[in-house]
Image (cartoon, rainbow, N blue to C red):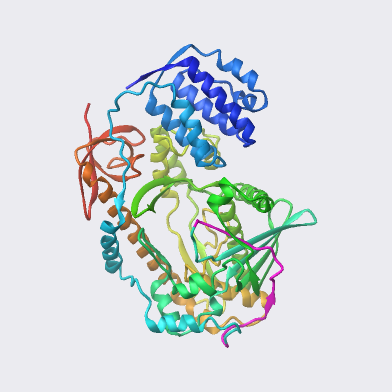
């Protein structure tokens, strides 16, 4: 359904919003340029010039003159306009907080005389108390125990000892002077990493402290054996079941603020172009100065954090440029997440924020440094993935053409992603197809002293990074990191690798693969349970969904991916009807034939 809009009022409101944006000091020129060009081209049929948004920030009067050249009345498809505004603001204006986005959207839609809507818009939520027993059953079926045994808890308490236990090798230095801070999702308690960045002779030096889990877990203890069964922390909408008991993972072993904690301290010196120029790794005592959340640093960063944010962005940009130059392949696919508020669960699609990716670049840098040390030592465990083959890339090009994704023959996959709006309908289907490039990841142990049993992998690189990589930065939540860290500490420190770490190599890769597969099964089942509960009251109602493949649709509201019967067209927004929503199959839709 189309709505009439008072063009003069719309233009004045838009000009006011742009003027307000200028006063906020937000670096929004490029972001607004993208928003305005998309909205005008797709909704008004009258594209604005590329520099209009820049003019709005530098010269509001000049921009207003340009806006007034539009027709006095325009006809707007309201659903398309709101979808464009919402998705582009979320992806292209990550620095804007929720209030700023709401003000912008409110001013844009205020002139509309809203009529009836032909499809269902629901504020979908499910009571946690009703779905929690389903989550418990999912974990029970998967073999995950919610509680740690008393013996395991006793071992965790014993690991609190301030002096290093007999199995711990290597000296421990005092690094309390470093201004380390943690950056995690709001409310996190299992804090694996703390970061500090400084400039030395005009280049970056990254200090990255990782929780020293190996110092607290006695090899062969009940705690050690329990972690070998759990493999990784299990995340469910109602609770998280830690790899280690909370007394440890959320207490003395966590890098909580103002707590002196045992850590493994990586010092990474970068060349001017961001290449890794020097690596040091030692056991240390550290004290995190402050615990930040992504929300805080994105929406209302305190003054004392601005230098760190700027340095993280600069390091992140350098590392991303190097990754791209190596021909690495990434997948910027928004994640489907369950959130809980006031006892109710909701689903949403969320793209990673810039700061999250900057932080991830520090972790990836450390993992690459660890892989370098392992390869030098001739022993370790790498995280590998085959690179995308020429045949796979060519097949994806054909799929892109079928979906209407523009991918010039001269452009690389990375070049194409630069111009892909990941929330456009055709892009959603394309990113599902692109998953085919990211298959075959595994953990590959090797030991040059045992070439018959643990040979060097055929390929030592991770295809998504186009470089060797190892897991060492999340030992509170992932088992393999503890073992890989010990290899790096021993090699850099010049002492023998502990026997317990070497003895783990034959089985750790297989165990990790099985544990991660179990975690993925639990996650998918929990999301399906939430989708079922959200939609069960709406059987028979109509929605809009994007075809991801010939039998799957993705709804924007609520954020659901489900099976769909009928003639599903990949990359096309279609009307669908909910025909059922029950466990264990989840919701099922059918295409509405016009």
- Counting from the top left corner in percent of width and height, residue 113 is at 37, 21
Does the magenta run of residues contain 184?
A: yes
- Counting from the top left corner in percent of width and height, residue 455 is at 51, 72
Which region of the structure is painted magenta? 166-186
| Residue located at (61% from left, 84% from top) | 163
For residue 59, what is the image quadrant? top right
For residue 215, what is the image quadrant? bottom right
- Counting from the top left corner in percent of width and height, residue 41 is at 48, 22
Image-based side of 177 in relation to 479, left or right: right
Can see residue 283? Answer: no
The outermost residue toward the right is 201
Can see residue 215? Answer: yes
| Residue located at (45% from left, 52% from top) | 438
Image-based side of 65 in relation to 425, left or right: right
Does the magenta run of residues contain 394?
A: no
Principal secondary structure, stretch drawn in magenta? loop
Measured along the vertical axis of the image, is residue 33 above or below residue 257? Answer: above
**Quadrant into which the N terminus falls:** top left
Nearest the viewer among 125 and 240 is 125
């Amino acid at each position: 359904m189309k709505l009439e809009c008072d063009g003069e009022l719309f233009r004045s409101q838009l000009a006011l919003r742009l003027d307000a944006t200028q006063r906020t000091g937000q670096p929004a020129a490029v972001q607004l340029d993208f928003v305005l060009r998309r909205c005008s081209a797709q909704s008004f049929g009258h594209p604005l010039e590329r520099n209009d948004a820049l003019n709005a920030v530098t010269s509001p009067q000049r921009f207003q003159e340009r806006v007034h050249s539009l027709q006095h009345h325009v006809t707007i498809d309201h659903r398309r306009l709101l979808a464009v505004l919402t998705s582009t603001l979320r992806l292209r204006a990550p620095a804007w907080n929720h209030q700023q986005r709401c003000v912008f959207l409110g001013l844009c839609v205020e002139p509309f005389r809203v009529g009836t809507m032909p499809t269902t818009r629901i504020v979908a939520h499910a009571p946690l108390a009703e779905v929690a027993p389903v989550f418990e059953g999912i974990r029970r079926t998967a073999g995950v125990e919610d509680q740690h045994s008393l013996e395991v808890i006793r071992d965790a308490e014993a690991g609190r000892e301030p002096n290093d236990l007999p199995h711990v090798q290597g000296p421990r230095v005092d690094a309390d002077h470093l201004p380390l801070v943690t950056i995690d999702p709001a409310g996190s308690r299992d804090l694996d990493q703390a970061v500090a960045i400084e400039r030395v002779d005009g280049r970056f030096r990254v200090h990255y402290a990782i929780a020293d889990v190996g110092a607290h877990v006695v090899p062969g203890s009940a705690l050690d054996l329990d972690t070998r069964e759990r493999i990784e922390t299990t995340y469910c909408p109602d609770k998280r079941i830690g790899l280690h008991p909370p007394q440890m993972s959320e207490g003395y072993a966590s890098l909580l603020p103002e707590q002196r904690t045992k850590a493994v301290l990586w010092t990474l010196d970068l060349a001017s172009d961001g290449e890794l120029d020097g690596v040091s790794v030692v056991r240390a005592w550290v004290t995190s100065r402050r615990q930040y959340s992504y929300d805080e640093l994105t929406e209302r960063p305190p003054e004392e954090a601005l230098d760190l944010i700027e340095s993280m962005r600069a390091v992140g940009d350098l590392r991303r440029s190097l990754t791209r130059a190596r021909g690495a392949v990434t997948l910027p696919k928004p994640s489907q997440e369950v959130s809980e508020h006031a006892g109710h669960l909701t689903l949403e699609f969320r793209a990673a924020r810039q700061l999250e990716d900057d932080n991830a670049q520090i972790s990836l840098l450390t993992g690459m440094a660890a892989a370098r040390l392992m390869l030098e030592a001739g022993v370790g465990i790498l995280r590998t993935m085959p690179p995308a083959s020429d045949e796979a890339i060519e097949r994806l090009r054909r799929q892109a053409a079928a979906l209407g994704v523009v991918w010039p023959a001269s452009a690389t996959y990375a070049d194409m992603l630069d111009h892909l709006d990941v929330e456009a309908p055709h892009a959603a289907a394309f990113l599902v197809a692109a998953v085919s490039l990211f298959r075959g990841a595994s953990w590959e142990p090797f030991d040059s002293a045992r070439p018959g049993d643990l040979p060097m992998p055929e390929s030592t690189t991770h295809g998504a990074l186009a470089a060797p990589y190892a897991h060492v930065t999340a030992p509170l939540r992932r088992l393999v990191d503890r073992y890989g860290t010990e290899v790096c500490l021993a090699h850099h420190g010049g002492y023998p690798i502990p026997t317990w770490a070497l003895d783990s190599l034959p089985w750790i890769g297989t165990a990790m693969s099985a544990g991660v597969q179990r975690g993925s099964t639990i996650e998918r089942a929990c999301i399906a349970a939430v989708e079922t509960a959200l939609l069960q009251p709406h059987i028979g109602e109509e929605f809009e969904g994007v075809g991801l493949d010939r039998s799957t649709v993705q709804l924007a509201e609520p954020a659901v991916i489900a099976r769909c019967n009928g003639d599903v067209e990949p990359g096309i927004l279609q009307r669908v009807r909910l025909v059922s929503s029950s466990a264990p199959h989840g919701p099922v839709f059918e295409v509405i034939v016009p």
